[in-house]
Amino acid sequence: MGPFDTSRVAVPGEPGATPPKLRTGLRSRHLLSVGDLEGDEISLIFDTAEAMKEIELRPIKKVPALRGKTIVNLFYEPSTRTRTSFEIAEKRLSADSLNVAVAGSSMVKGETLFDTARNLEAMAPDMIVLRHQASGAPFQLASICRAGVINAGDGMHEHPTQALLDGFTIRAHKGQIEGLKIAIVGDLLHSRVFRSNLLLLRALGAEVWVCGPPTLIPPGIERFGVTATTRLDEAAEGADVIMMLRIQRERMLGHFVPSLREYFMVYGLTVERVERAKPDVIIMHPGPMNRGVEIASEVADGPYSVMLDQVANGVAVRMAVLYLLAGNPDEM
Ligand code: CP
């Protein structure tokens, strides 16, 4: 029974209800890197996310778990999925949340992240969700803030909640992660989603293959216990999961692929290439995807695609992360 299944009627505000006990478990008040999470913490996040999914089925999709908490969503880079799912998650947990849009703030006048954070901090938020173009920015923020900091994507470094929702989605479809052949394909070099997934999936015992053009595979990646190949057919052969990554042209300072048309010919996931994988393979993509570049529309919209499950699970996983971080009474 999860933290919100406490007899279903145990929701504060409802007649006869007793407040749900906050279940603590995350050792830090911040979520900056998947590498900071122990295996039991990852399992706790997944199990808590299962309980959160039950809330989505209720006529009133709201619980008072974070009532009185203030959460600032501070996004310096564009986002569709992460920003909206954090905001929905915060509202479903009854937190007071606000979005700081870079275009409408004093950041356009040259204010630094440090000064912006110090001024936001003066208004006593409990948590700050930060997306920033600089790798390491959430670590800097955490070092100067009393508020808990959640990394919603920092440069080319990490995107921990994306990896958690990916792992949660794989577990939901496959029952487990240990022993699965998971092929991660595309622009590995510039991908924070890849880095967080690498840490998560290896920690959970997956057999991770990585595939892309030689220019987009980080040198020495085998040291992390993965098998690297430049041949997509080899990566896809017998795979349980194929995770496609976007070519991140906005982060490229040179020419890494001859042309997008040629890239699709060699590394685009087509129906024929999917047929090399296990019959029950699932196809994942963190979004936003470039149809006809890393993935064919027939695959993206096909029967093996779980991309919209990933998006749906993003809300439950982010609810779980917010709930567990806020439930750390020693730190908040
Ligand atoms: N997957 C992901 O981070 O998507 P957004 O950039 O839309 O948030």
Image (spheres, rainbow, N blue to C red):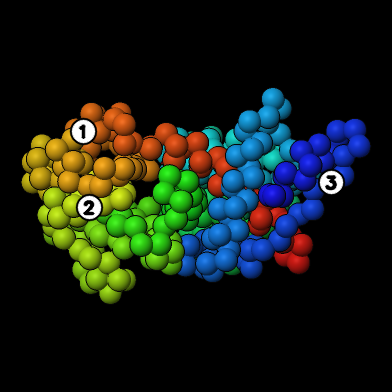
Question: Could you tell me residue 62's position as x and y percent?
Answer: 71, 34
Q: Which dot marks residue 296?
A: 1
Q: In terms of secondary structure, where does tag 1 sit?
A: loop
Of mark 1 and mark 2, the one earlier in the sequence is 2
Between the residue at mark 2 and the residue at mark 3, the CA separation in whole angstroms equals: 48 Å
Q: Quadrant of the C terminus?
A: bottom right
The answer for how far apart the CA atoms under marks 1 and 2 are is 20 Å
The secondary element bearing badge 3 is classed as: loop
Give the crowd class for mark 3: few <14, some 14-19, many >=20 residues within 10 Å: some
Q: Which residue is nearer to you in this view: 322 or 153?
A: 322
What's the distance in space between the residues labelled 1 and 3, CA to CA? 48 Å
Residue at image x 51%, y 42%? 314
Q: Closer to the observer: label 1 or label 2?
A: 2
Around disc 1, counting alpha carbons within 10 Å, would you say few (fewer than 14), some (14 to 19), or many (20 or more)?
Answer: some
Quarter residue 73 falls in: top right
- Please name the amino acid that badge 3 sits on: Pro
Labels 1 and 3: the sequence-earlier one: 3
**Residue 282, image x and y in percent?**
33, 43
Q: Residue 19 got which mark?
A: 3
Looking at the image, is 318 positioned above or below residue 26? Answer: above
Q: Which residue is mark 2?
A: 238
Q: Is residue 22 visible?
A: yes
Return the mark for residue 154. Answer: none
Q: Which residue: 30% across, 28% down?
A: 301
**Looking at the image, is mark 2 or mark 3 nearer the viewer?**
2
Image vertical order of residue 296 relative to residue 125, above or below: above
User: Of the residues shown, which amino acid type is indicated by label 2?
Assistant: Gly
Q: Report helix, strand or loop for mark 2.
A: loop
